[in-house]
Amino acid sequence: MGKLVKFFSRRRTWSLPYVLFLAVFVVAPLLLIMVYAFQAEDGGFSLENFEKFIHQREAMNTFIYSIGIALITTLICILLGYPAAYILSKMRTSTARIVVMLFILPMWINVLVRTLATVALFDFLTLPLGEGALIFGMVYNFLPFMIYPIYNVLQKMDHSLIEAAEDLGATPRQVFTKVVFPLSMPGIVSGIMMVFMPTISTFAIAELLTMNNIKLFGTTIQENINNGMWHYGAALSFIMLVIIGLTTLFTGSEDENSANDGGLL
């Protein structure tokens, strides 16, 4: 009995459920993707799935198009999200919390419901569904993921640095470009990761807002897996994982550089 009590009193014991969860729902699926991606139909090691992707013009064009849509969506979210976050950071805390809650409130609704509401809005306004509707839907769904991390960083910023820059004679523009913007880069980087990565891999939004006329890379992966082409679908998923990993490394290095380069004047 004493050994059992001692076992459950250890901190490592309480981490076992989390380790088990990661092993079953994160590590195991990733390993399966890697195994299937580098495996031929006969079970042997092969790169034919990646060769098929390179030589298949439709899949390659879809991949490039998806990256383009993700970049456009991320850029629009930055252009809209940063001013919104900056204005929120200047509000009183109580007011800002209410406005932030209004931004986050739609995120509690299922993404399919939000997308169907967007389709209904376009139908009501008699606007055509297509590429424009797709970008609008992407921005609508992922804009809060850009606003909140930037707002969080701006709100916690050390205002003594801003006061010091003003005391040194910096203009409002110089204060923003030399102090505020560099110090808010961690929030921007987090927002980019939270917008770019799900945008490049989503498929439900594209199907609903384009009447399945425009395919993104996530749609291609879904179609191949649904059609039983597990190896090719796994290879496409592995390519997506590589892109996400490179994005994470790039944004992480940019975050460190901005933190080191931030200064007063």
Image (tube, grey):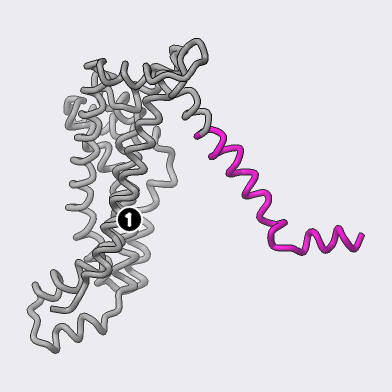
Query: Which residue carries the number 1 mark?
Result: 252
Q: Look at the magenta stretch and give its main secondary structure.
A: helix
Q: Nearer the viewer, residue 259 or 68?
A: 259
- How many callouts does the rendering have? 1
Residue projecting furthest to the front: 45
Q: Which residue is at the far bottom?
A: 167
Residue 107 placement (x, y as % from top left): 40, 46
10 Å crowding of disc 1: few (<14), some (14-19), many (20+): some
| Local SS, label 1 | helix
Q: Amino acid at mark 1?
A: Gly
Give the quarter of the image for residue 72: top left
Judge by depth and name the residue closer to the eye, 78 or 23: 23
Give residue 95's position: percent from left, percent from top.
33, 69
Closest to the observer: 89 or 12?
Answer: 12
Q: Residue furthest right?
A: 1
Kindly identify the residue that appears in the image at 72 percent across and 56 percent down: 13
Residue 41 highlighted magenta (yes or no) = no
Query: Is residue 82 visible to us here?
Result: yes
Name the one closer to the observer, 175 or 105. Answer: 175
Give the magenta-colored segment's residue range: 1-30
Query: Which part of the image, by quadrant, shows the C terminus?
Result: bottom left
Q: Position of residue 141 (x, y in %)?
A: 32, 42
Quadrant position of the N terminus in the picture:
bottom right
175 lies left or right of 153: left
Name above or below for residue 30 compared with residue 156.
above
Visible residue check, residue 116:
no
The percent position of residue 129, horizontal first and vertical second, equals 21, 25
Name the residue: 26% across, 70% down. 260
Residue 221 relative to residue 85: left or right:
right
Residue 11 belongs to the span the image colors magenta: yes
